[in-house]
Image (cartoon, rainbow, N blue to C red):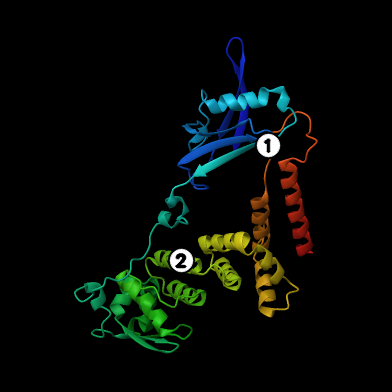
Amino acid sequence: MVHLYRTNFGVPSRPRIHLYLEQSRVVTTHPSPKECKFSFRLLEDDNYHGTVTAIRSVTTFSSMDSFRVPRDSQFVDLLTQCFTNQYNSGKTILITVDLLFSIESFNLGFSNWMSMVPAPPADTTNDFRFKVLSDEGADFTIHCRDGDLKISKSALFLSSDYFRFLFTANDEGLMSKEQSVPNYNLESVRKVLVFMITGTFEMPDNLTPELARELIDIAMHFKPLNRDALRNTIHRALCKLLLKDSSVLDKIVHFLVFAHEMNLSQLKIMCMSIIVYEHYKRFKQEYNEESPNADHRAAHERLHRSGLLLTVSLLSRIDSIRLQSLKCRRVFRYGAKSNQTSFQNIMDEKVRNQKRKLNRWQK
């Protein structure tokens, strides 16, 4: 939040105009900028303009440092003259805040996640973890949709809550030598088992939302000891995959529906952001209840139903983000209204036009 305030210190009193930027009080809500710059310009007069690099200001009630204009700077002198000069009454001052963030601020939050799964080492010949995966000692068979997989029963017992319960629940489980998972492909099951036993995961080259769903479902079924790390790793890979081709709207909508159903928050945020800033008009035109494309109508219905009790749907969230991105709030205005059309009036009219378009599309 930007604050503009006036002081009258000194004898005789000397009016001074100051600018102050207060950051979010919740650390995890927004990243903290490395640098902040304030600029101002009198829209109808080129004599008043200035730019200054702000200094950090430690606050008592905020968990993050804020920024303010140096009090004894030429910028403050010019800004004060601009506001106190009666000749400028009725004119509009445009105040701009430029924030410089580090590259790490845009890492989608993955660096803050508790754990990720490493890839298998290049050479596993002498790695004891992978020796368990060999056919020697494989005394248990898992029947998959497209084939059978032999594995060590002891390894399954030690690495999976599901198999530990299965093998110890009764005598039948203790003596069992096979398990059927007809809904899953052999290769997907093998990758999850390798993760369970070795703590490594090889990401499929042909990763898709459908394959990601299967891998996550298998992990939820077998209940490996560190399944959240596997979910995080797949989540991150999907985000990278989306960035490789963000120009295809159908693909983005497909990812969005999947991300919402699987509760993959970072992927969902990415999809909505790309739609808002790159494909919004096409999205509203093609994905609606009257679309001639049956797949588009079905996707629209799934996005419309995505809102739960006391929550809004993804469609409403996308529209809300779009409106917020178009807002241009007036920082300060004083005196009589100018006879000329101000910059703010133009921006207000643009926002009103966008709202009218949204209402027509929603109807």
Between the C-alphas of marks 2 and 1, the distance is 43 Å
Q: Position of residue 246 (x, y in %)?
A: 54, 67
Residue 35 in sight in this render: yes
Q: Which dot, 2 or 1, sits closer to the camera?
A: 1
- Note whether 212 is above or below 117 in the view shown: below
Q: Looking at the image, which is closer to me, 161 or 88?
A: 88
Earlier-in-chain disc, 2 versus 1: 1
Q: Which mark is residue 240?
A: 2
* Circle 2 residues within 10 Å: few <14, some 14–19, many ≥20: few
Q: Position of residue 42 (x, y in %)?
A: 66, 34
- Note whether 86 is above or below 331 in the view shown: above
Residue 24 in sight in this render: no
Q: Looking at the image, which is closer to me, 160 or 188?
A: 188
Q: Is residue 183 left or right of residue 310?
A: left
Q: Is residue 47 left or right of residue 22?
A: right
Q: What residue is at 70 percent from the left and 66 percent from the top?
A: 284
